[in-house]
């Protein structure tokens, strides 16, 4: 950032190899190099970028611990620019998390463990992963940020909580398989995600960085469509195709202030009212006899 | 013989597709799933019907025509038109091809079992053809690419370890009416798209006569039953005939075994496909 809020962000819309951490680390190095040469100051990789998505029983073999040499090696990727990447994190008590980690200047800055693990339809995450238990924002050299991994954004409360923490940007690494064929130009999933991401950006007056992967795993395609959305809901940059691509956007974080002056939605939020009403709903639910 | 499938009739709206979007995904699927396991080529049985003509077209676009080997395998009772349609596809796409008449080996086998009914003969031919495809896949250093569509897979209207067998299948999630739309859009000859679907075990055979219903109606019912999970009562509410519903639901249920790997008797604590679960694209 140049000090006035302007920032170059990049999304690595990549195709990780399934269950091959070594090969993926090499690919991460190449994307980091490419993004740095393009002048990016923040580079976002997709969900589970270091391992691939449909890991099944490969989850334990793909995991790394936070205080491991492998993690320090990953932190090294952020020498020249900040990096968000996806990995399987093993806790000291041997629970495995689908996590996205934020590195800055060679240091681990934040870990978000995916809270909402889809286990329906084509998904089976709760069989293999433990759920995260928090949504927390964190400081970056550029402003406050929060991370939500893929399915997390399908729960309104996740983005809402981050917005009340005052984030300037929500970063959403994703491995979304494409499905839903109609006469439309795009898959049903692509339409849905664009709607959700733009709605969050506009409702919560925040930048929204959505990085989805591409490629195929066991016949399922990942549709890409990575996008950078401004706090007014406009798409600033997007890769429409399901090809590997570095999506670059020059954003001005001061747009957050301008947008919140024009639309002071966040100022008018009633946190206490929301908490009270949620508590009431919760009590009423638990009082039901059956 | 039932009326030929006509593209001029309107397609049931939920089953209408954007063919360019589907084509791109399927071409990507073939490129990706073939190359990442170390192959450049595919082999398929080309019958002269719409399913295999469509798969041949997608494969030629994905890998280049010289990396696609089509094997044409007539039996003496096959309709000669099937062979000429298949050769038209070969010429149009510029793909490799090989003709293997399966009559000698089929007749030699059934000389010992002259009472075998048409079903046994048909299944044997389907497996004979598939065994030739697998043998050629070794010679051509190729993967066998499948041509079963979603309608046949759900109805079990195919031969297990025969035409249903393959390494990868690009059209297994497309209903027959969607196959017609895509085939038409990618340039499969209109005569092939429009002709009455047939397993061609004998001249004049028709899928729709054998199944007892038209694909257009079957696909509508399957869409509500499978994709939308309508109950039988809800299907009746959609105006489908009770006997039609009963027959299709029975077929889907009774043929479930054809869509699964063989059952393994469970003994250990980590049984293949039960607790031992790895992606097929393991490390790819």
Image (cartoon, rainbow, N blue to C red):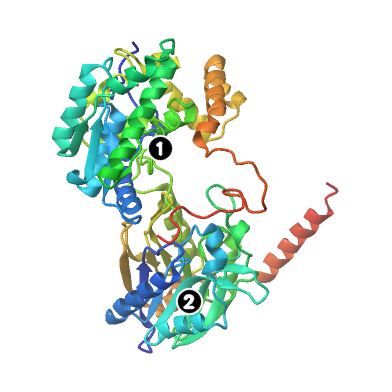
Dot 1: element: loop
Circle 2 residue? A168
Q: Residue furthest right?
A: A289
Residue placed most toward the observer, A175 or A290: A175
Asked if residue B248 lies left or right of residue B118, the reply is: right
- The answer to whether residue B20 is seen in the rendering is no
Q: Quadrant of the C terminus of chain B?
A: bottom left
Determine which quarter of the picture holds residue A89.
bottom right
Image location of residue B104, percent across then percent down: 28, 20
Mark 2: secondary structure: loop
Instruction: Indicate which disc residue B172 carries.
Output: 1
The residue drawn where x is 45% and y is 78% is: A257
What percent of the width, then of the height, locates residue B280? 46, 52
Residue drawn at the location 76% of the way across and 59% of the way down: A282
Q: Position of residue B172 (x, y in %)?
A: 40, 37
Q: Is residue A111 visible?
A: yes
Residue A241's quadrant in the figure? bottom left
């Amino acid at each position: 950032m140049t000090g006035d809020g302007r920032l170059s962000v990049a999304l690595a819309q990549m195709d990780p190899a399934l269950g091959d951490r070594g090969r993926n680390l090499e690919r991460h190095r190449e994307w980091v190099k490419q993004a740095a040469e393009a002048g990016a100051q923040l580079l976002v990789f997709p969900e589970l970028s270091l391992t691939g998505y449909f890991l099944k029983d490969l989850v334990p073999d793909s995991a790394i611990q936070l205080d491991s040499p492998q993690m320090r090696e990953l932190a090294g990727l952020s020498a020249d620019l900040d990096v968000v990447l996806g990995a399987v994190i093993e806790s000291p008590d041997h629970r495995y998390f689908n996590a996205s980690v934020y590195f800055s200047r060679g240091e681990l800055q934040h870990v978000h463990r995916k809270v909402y693990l889809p286990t329906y339809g084509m998904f089976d995450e709760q069989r293999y992963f433990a759920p995260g238990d928090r949504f927390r924002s964190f400081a970056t050299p550029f402003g406050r940020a929060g991370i939500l991994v893929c399915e997390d954004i399908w729960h309104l409360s996740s983005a809402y909580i981050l917005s009340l923490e005052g984030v300037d940007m929500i970063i959403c690494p994703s491995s979304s398989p494409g499905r839903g064929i109609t006469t439309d130009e795009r898959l049903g999933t692509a339409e849905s995600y664009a709607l959700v991401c733009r709605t969050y950006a506009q409702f919560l007056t925040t930048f929204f960085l959505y990085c989805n992967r591409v490629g195929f795993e066991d016949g399922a395609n990942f549709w890409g469509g990575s996008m950078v959305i401004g706090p007014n809901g406009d798409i600033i940059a997007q890769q429409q195709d399901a090809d590997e691509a570095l999506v670059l956007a020059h954003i001005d974080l001061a747009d957050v202030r301008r947008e919140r002056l024009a639309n002071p939605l966040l100022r008018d939020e009633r946190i206490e009212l929301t908490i009270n009403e949620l508590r009431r709903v919760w009590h009423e639910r638990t009082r039901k006899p059956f | 013989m039932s009326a030929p499938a006509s593209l001029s009739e309107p397609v049931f709206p939920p089953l209408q597709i954007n063919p360019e979007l589907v084509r791109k995904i399927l071409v990507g699927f073939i490129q990706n799933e073939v190359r990442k396991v170390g192959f450049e080529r595919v082999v398929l049985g080309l019958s002269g019907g719409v399913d295999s003509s469509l798969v041949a077209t997608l494969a030629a676009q994905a890998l280049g025509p010289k990396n696609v080997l089509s094997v044409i395998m007539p039996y003496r009772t096959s309709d000669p038109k099937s062979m000429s349609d298949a050769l038209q596809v070969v010429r149009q796409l510029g793909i490799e091809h090989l003709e293997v008449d399966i009559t000698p080996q089929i007749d030699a086998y059934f000389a010992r079992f002259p009472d075998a009914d048409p079903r046994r003969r048909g299944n044997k031919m389907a497996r004979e053809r598939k065994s030739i495809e697998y043998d050629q896949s070794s010679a051509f250093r190729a993967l066998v690419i499948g041509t079963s569509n979603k309608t046949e897979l759900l109805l079990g209207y195919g031969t297990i370890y025969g035409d249903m067998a393959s390494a990868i299948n690009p059209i297994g999630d497309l209903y027959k009416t969607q196959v017609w739309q895509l085939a038409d859009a990618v340039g499969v000859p209109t005569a092939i798209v429009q002709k009455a679907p047939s397993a061609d075990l004998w001249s004049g055979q028709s899928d729709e006569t054998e199944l007892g219903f038209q694909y257009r109606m079957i696909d509508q019912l399957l869409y509500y039953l499978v994709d939308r999970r309508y109950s039988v009562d809800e299907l009746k509410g959609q105006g489908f005939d009770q006997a039609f519903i009963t027959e299709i639901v029975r077929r889907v249920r009774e043929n479930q075994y054809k869509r699964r790997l063989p059952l393994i008797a469970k003994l250990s604590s980590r049984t293949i496909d039960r607790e031992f679960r790895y992606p097929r694209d393991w490390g790819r």
